[in-house]
């Protein structure tokens, strides 16, 4: 039984998808791109804004046994993206087949190494776009928010991270223990590295591909996403936070185990602080309203 979420969804919300076994017959028709949906249009998901043709956007999606979730996730991706890369962690279900049927032209890449950090490294290194966006396959990160992340980059950010805390933010998947852990990691990171993050354990990120050298690509485990934020901040790049709403996993089982992942993250933060030889540079994480 799930703990009570700590935040309610905003009034303007996309329609929640029903859980269950994916019905491929009911999935979007096999066209060059997924069919536009009425709620997509209302949210501006498929809006052909001027920036889209000039900046190639790569979507990187790590996936392990996510056949049930992908039919609810892939059709939400804006049709103007340059490429969608699914990094398959050697799934034993129909993840690859479903991905190809729902989004024809998707690039399937076999993950090298183990862990989410390894999956993200594989996808980032394979991306061909000018902009790279990291999306979860379980439906927790909403593709309808992609324009807000790209817009922040176009406006001058080097790296954009989603935040579930602040005006217009929230989560349907944040249990009290996860909230407490995130709060502790935010406090620890801001004290040790003189940053001003509002959220640390949320992996919805976007960056200009030319800055991928600043990421913690050598880290394979769950601490990768947290150390990535820290290194980007200390590198002097302009880091911007945008409001984001985390949704519940659509289907399947979560790969993250709270206590073991939390211990990895804590060790990673301490190890990163000990590895810093120079005084860290303070970088303000600016909040930007999601569009």
Image: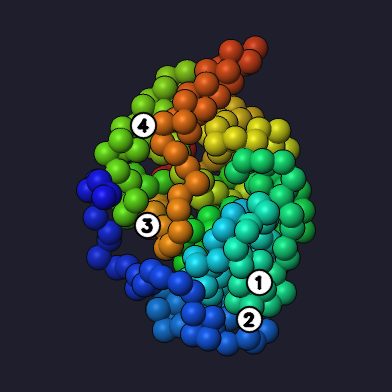
Q: Measuring 66% from the left and 33% from the top, which residue is drawn there?
A: 219
Above-or-below relation of 78 to 190: below
Query: In the rendered structure, which disc, 4 or 2, sits on the residue that comes first in sequence?
Result: 2
Q: CA distance from mark 4 to mark 2?
A: 40 Å
Query: In the rendered structure, which disc, 1 or 4, sits on the residue that comes first in sequence?
Result: 1
Q: CA distance from mark 3 to mark 4?
A: 18 Å
Residues at discs 1 and 2 in contact (Cβ within 8 Å)? no
**Is 169 situated left or right of 210 in this image?**
left
Above-or-below relation of 43 to 167: below
Total of numbered circles in the picture?
A: 4
The residue wearing badge 3 is 248
Label 4 secondary element: helix
Query: In the rendered structure, which disc, 2 or 3, sits on the residue that comes first in sequence?
Result: 2
Q: CA distance from mark 1 to mark 3?
A: 24 Å
Q: CA distance from mark 1 to mark 2?
A: 16 Å
Residues at discs 2 and 3 in contact (Cβ within 8 Å)? no
Q: Residues within 10 Å of mark 3 (few under 14, many from 20)?
A: some
Residue 161 visible, this angle: no
Q: Which residue is at the front of the view, 194 or 102?
A: 102
Q: Based on the displayed image, in which of its 4 quarters is residue 182 positioned?
A: top left
Residues at discs 1 and 4 in contact (Cβ within 8 Å)? no
**Is 70 situated left or right of 179 in this image?**
right
Marking on residue 97: 1
| Residue 116 in the image, given as x and y percentages of width and height | 60, 43
Label 2 secondary element: loop
| Residue 68 in the image, given as x and y percentages of width and height | 50, 67
Give the label, 1 or 4, closer to the camera. 1
The residue wearing badge 2 is 33
Above-or-below relation of 276 to 220: above
| Residue 109 in the image, given as x and y percentages of width and height | 74, 58
The residue wearing badge 4 is 181
């Amino acid at each position: 039984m799930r703990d009570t979420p700590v935040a309610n969804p905003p009034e303007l919300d996309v329609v929640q998808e029903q859980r269950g076994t994916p019905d491929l017959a009911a999935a979007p028709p096999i066209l060059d791109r997924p069919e536009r949906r009425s709620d997509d249009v209302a949210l501006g998901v498929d809006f052909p804004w001027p920036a889209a043709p000039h900046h190639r956007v790569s979507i990187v999606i790590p996936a392990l046994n996510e056949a049930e979730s992908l039919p609810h996730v892939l059709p939400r991706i804006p049709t103007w993206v340059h490429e969608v890369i699914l990094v398959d962690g050697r799934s034993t279900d129909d993840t690859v087949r479903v991905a190809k049927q729902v989004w024809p032209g998707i690039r399937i890449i076999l993950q090298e190494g183990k862990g989410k950090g390894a999956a993200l490294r594989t996808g980032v290194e394979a991306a061909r776009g000018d902009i790279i966006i990291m999306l979860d396959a379980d439906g927790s990160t909403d593709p309808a928010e992609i324009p807000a992340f790209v817009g922040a980059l176009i406006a001058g950010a080097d790296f954009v991270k989603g935040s579930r805390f602040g005006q217009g933010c929230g989560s349907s998947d944040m249990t009290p223990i996860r909230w407490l852990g995130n709060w502790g990691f935010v406090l620890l990171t801001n004290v040790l590295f003189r940053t001003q993050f509002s959220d640390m354990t949320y992996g919805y990120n976007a960056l200009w591909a030319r800055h991928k050298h600043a990421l913690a690509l050598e880290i394979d485990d769950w601490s990768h996403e947290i150390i990535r934020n820290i290194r980007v901040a200390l590198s002097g790049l302009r880091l911007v936070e945008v409001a984001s709403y985390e949704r519940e996993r659509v289907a399947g089982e979560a790969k993250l185990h709270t206590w073991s992942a939390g211990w990895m993250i804590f060790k990673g933060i301490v190890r990163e602080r000990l590895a810093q030889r120079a005084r860290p540079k303070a970088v303000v994480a600016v909040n930007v309203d999601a569009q």
